[in-house]
Image: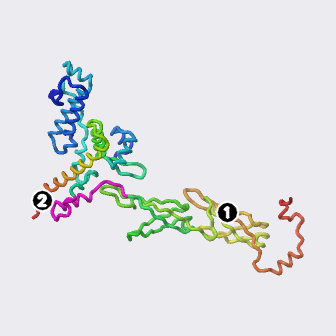
Amino acid sequence: MKDPYETLGVARTATSAEIRKAYRKLAKTLHPDLNPGNAEAEERFKGLSAANEILSDPEKRKRFDAGEIDASGTERPRQPYYKDYAGNNAGANPYENTSGFSDFSGADDIFAEMFRRQGRQSRRMRGHDLNYSLTVDFLDAINGAKKRISLPDGGSLDLTIPAGIEDNKVLRLRGKGAPGGGQGEAGDALVTITVGAHAFFVRKGDDIHLDLPVTIGEAALGARLKVPTPSGAVMVSVPKGSNTGSVLRLKGKGIAHGGIHGDQLVTLRVMLPNKADAALEGFLATWTPEPEYNPRKDMQP
Amino acid sequence: MIINRLEFMHRAQIDQQTLEIWLREEWLLPNEMVTDMEFSEVDLARAIFILDLKERLGVNDDGVGVILHLVDQVHGLRRLLGGLLTQKPAA
C-alpha cells in the first residue's frame, strides 16, 4: 500500500487540521456515491480512507511514524454504498428521478418514451388516506349491515358495518385510499359513521332505552304486552301495580358486541285515555282511595 | 428485506431526532404503514451515504439536500442511458 502521507498529499509534518482538510478535499471527488460507475474512484477512495484511518488518529500516526505499524491492514470492511442499490434492478430505487431531463419528454423518439416510462415509477410514496362519511340507520348500527358508498369518480366502496357501532366511529379500509407513488402502497379510506336517530329507541352505552306507553288498566292489573326490541318484538309481562317510571329490564336485548350483551330498559308511562271516558270518570267520582294513597306525601313542606 | 424503524436507527446508528429531521427533509422516503415505517436496504445505504456526506465530507444540511437531488438525477440518467444501450434496435 502507498504511503499514507503521499495518498493524502500532505507533508509528514502536517497538522491534524491539514490532514482533515486534505482528506475531505479528496473524498469529495472520490467518494463512490459521488462517482457511480467509476471503479477507479472507488479503489482510490478505499486507499484514501485507509490513509486517513492512520493519520487522523494521533496514536496510530505516531506508531506509523515510528515504524511500528505499516499502512496495510487498516482498510475498513467495505460499507454498502448507495450507488450499489440505486443502480440496480429497474424500479428498485424509489429516490431516482429524471426530472432534470423532462425537456426531452416532448420529443417523439425513443429517449422520450424511456423518459416517460421512467417517470411513471416516481417515488415510493404511500398514497393519501381519503375521508368519507356515511349515515347509517339506527337499527343497522345496532344489528350490523353491509353498505356500499358511491365515490365521486364512479367507483364504489363496500363496507361492513359491525354490529353495535357507535356514532362517530371511523372505519378504516386498508388500501382503499389514494394510490401510492411508484412502489408505494395505497392509502386507506377512512369512513366516519354517523348513526341516525330512531323514533323510539335510544342508545345509552350498551343498553337500549325505550319508553313504553301503557293503559291505566295494564299498569294497575298487570298484562302481557308485545314490546319492540332492535332484534324484533318480544312478549313482556307488566307486573300488577306498575306505574309511570317503573323499569323493566329485558336481559340481553341491548347491544351485542365482542361477547358483551347490553340490556333493553323499558320505562313504563301510564297514559289516560285521550278522550274523556264516562265510565272511568263515573268510577273515579265515587272512588274513595286508601288514605295512604298520596303521591305528594314526600313533598310536604 | 424490510427493516422496521428501530432496527433502521440501530443499523444506521442515528437517533430518533436525526431520523425525524431526515424524514422531514424527505432525504428518506420509507413506506409509511399505519403503525410503523418500513425501510429497505436502499434506505439504509442512503442513510450511510448521508452520514458520510455530513461527517466525513463536512457537508452542511443544505448541501446534503442539493447533493442528494443531483445524485438521484444522475441515477435516473444512468438508468435511461443503460436502457438505451441495451434496447434492441427496431426491426
Residue A124 lies in magenta, yes or no?
yes
Residue at 45% from the left image edge and 69% from the top image edge: A148
Residue positioned 29% across, 42% down in the render: B50
Q: Is residue A241 left or right of residue A83?
A: right
Q: Nearer the viewer, residue A119 or B38?
A: A119
Question: x, y (%) of residue A277?
Answer: 80, 80
Q: Which residue is depicted at the point 10% across and 60% down? A: B89
Query: Front-most of A146 and B12?
Result: B12
Mark 1 — residue?
A: A265
Q: Are marks 1 and 2 in contact (CB under 8 Å)?
A: no
Is A29 in front, or is A301? Answer: A29
| Picture coordinates of residue A281, whole percent (x, y) | 84, 78
Cα separation, mark 1 vs mark 2, equals: 79 Å
Quarter of the image with the C terminus of chain B is bottom left
Q: Which label was assigned to residue A223?
A: none
Count of marks, rendered view: 2
Q: Which residue is mark 2?
A: B88
* Label 2 chain ID: B
Amino acid found under the numbered disc labelled 1 = Leu
Amino acid type at image mark 2 = Lys
- Residue A188 in the figure: left or right of residue A34: right
Q: Which residues are magenta?
A: A102-127
